[in-house]
Amino acid sequence: QLQLVESGGGLVQPGGSLRLSCAASTFAFAYYTIGWFRQAPGKEREAVSCISGSGTKVANSEQGRFTITRDNARNMVYLQMNTLKPEDTAVYYCAADRHLTSQTMCATSPLPTYWGQGTQVTVSS
């Protein structure tokens, strides 16, 4: 069973930055595609960005402001978020699947198999 733990969320002012981290517990981390998703109150969960084990990236939204990276040696995936806006407020989740490409994962059909518990990001002055 793959476990994912997100961290790095918090309260930030508009225009600020945050870096979210996702730690994975698996020896086969490099074989997993990882994605960042978010869900705002009253809205459906949406894909933000996804990255394959080899580093192929897909950015579904916020192109230019959000950057996904991964460190396979440390079993970590990051989401650097810059120039944050109030509409970025949401619970951010990382998810993993060994059988999805980054493009398929960010298309959210099917949804990835493994999910973290989420980390809250609030953008407010």
Image (cartoon, grey):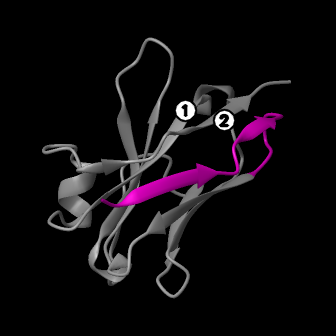
**Which residue has dot 1 on it?**
91
- x, y percent for residue 23: 54, 64
Q: Are discs 2 and 1 less than 8 Å apart at CB?
A: yes
Residue 21, compared with residue 42, is above or below; it is below
As measured in the structure, the alpha-carbon distance from the residue carrying label 2 to the one carrying label 1 is 6 Å
- x, y percent for residue 62: 50, 47
> Does residue 58 show up?
no
Q: Nearer the viewer, residue 114 or 34?
A: 114
> Does residue 112 show up?
yes
What segment is highlighted magenta in the picture? 1-17
- x, y percent for residue 13: 83, 34
Residue 85, compared with residue 40, is above or below; it is below
Picture residue at 26% right of the left edge, 64% below the top: 102
Picture residue at 68% right of the left edge, 26% below the top: 86
**Which residue has dot 2 on it?**
121
Indicate whether residue 16 is drawn in magenta: yes
Q: Which of 25 and 67 is in front in this view?
A: 25
Kind of residue at disc 1: Val
Mark found first going from the N terminus, 2 or 1 = 1
Picture residue at 17% right of the left edge, 63% below the top: 100
Residue 24, compared with residue 72, is above or below; it is above
Q: Is residue 11 left or right of residue 58?
A: right
Kind of residue at disc 2: Val
